[in-house]
Amino acid sequence: MTPTPTEALLDDLVVDHALSAGQVKRRYGIRLTPVRIRTLGLTSIERVMVTVHGAPASVLAVQFVALNPRWARQESWVLGHLAGVAEARTLTNNPRALWRSEAGRLDSARPDATYLMERGMSAVEFDTGSYDDNTVRRKLRDFGRNYAHVIYAVSGERRLTYVKRRLWTEWPSPDDRARFTLIRVPWWA
């Protein structure tokens, strides 16, 4: 039986932890009103934040929702990371049953999420554009060595071009590059 949009939202929040109002409207066709948020038992979180690092025009007021109220105590970047990783899951059609999000941790040596594929474990990294060159190269190199596949998601078009250049430097072979998926994830829209 196909879940209702509300059921799908609640199921996704178990895995994704927090979603932006834009994601909720786009994915489930649900407009978040105070009454609907209360009725669903969700926590509403409002933040003014940078959605694309280094782009002044990307400072936006963003509403998030979460099942667990503890997410309301998190910093803006954590919520943005959760929503960015959730958007990567949706855009790459990965089922929530095989996905584990750990976005928002301060351990940059580990990916923001992992998921199980037939070929083995895969890594997911979300980058708003704040990582320096050495960090991007290290993530591409280490995740490429340690995981069967890597999804590297970014919030801005310029960052996508930059990461693509870094990928070609770290992994010059087309066969190696085929194990990477680079995508732009406008999670706030």
Image (tube, rainbow, N blue to C red):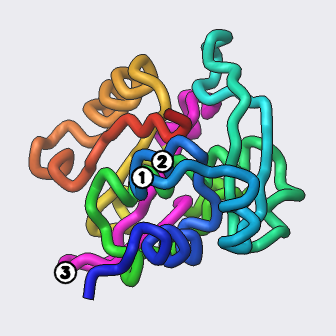
Question: In 3D space, how far apart are the residues under numbered discs 1 and 3 (Cα atoms)?
Answer: 32 Å
Q: Where is mark 1, residue-wise?
A: 29
Verify whether residue 71 appears in magenta.
Answer: no
Dot 1 or dot 3: first in sequence order is 1
Q: Where is mark 3, residue-wise?
A: 118
Residue at position x 68%, y 50% in the image: 33
Is residue 41 rendered to the left or right of residue 54? right
Mark 3 burial class by Cα count in 10 Å: few <14, some 14-19, many 20+: few
SS under mark 2? helix
Amino acid type of the residue tagged 3 in the rendering: Glu
Nearer to the camera, 162 or 53: 53
Mark 1 burial class by Cα count in 10 Å: few <14, some 14-19, many 20+: few
Magenta span of residues: 111-137
Verify whether residue 133 appears in magenta.
Answer: yes
SS under mark 3? loop
Residue extending furthest toward the front: 35
x and y percentages locating residue 115 in the rendered image: 38, 73
x and y percentages locating residue 143 in the rendered image: 42, 58
Residue at position x 19%, y 81% in the image: 118
Dot 2 or dot 3: first in sequence order is 2
Q: Where is mark 2, residue-wise?
A: 25
Question: In 3D space, how far apart are the residues under numbered discs 1 and 2 (Cα atoms)?
Answer: 4 Å
Amino acid type of the residue tagged 2 in the rendering: Lys
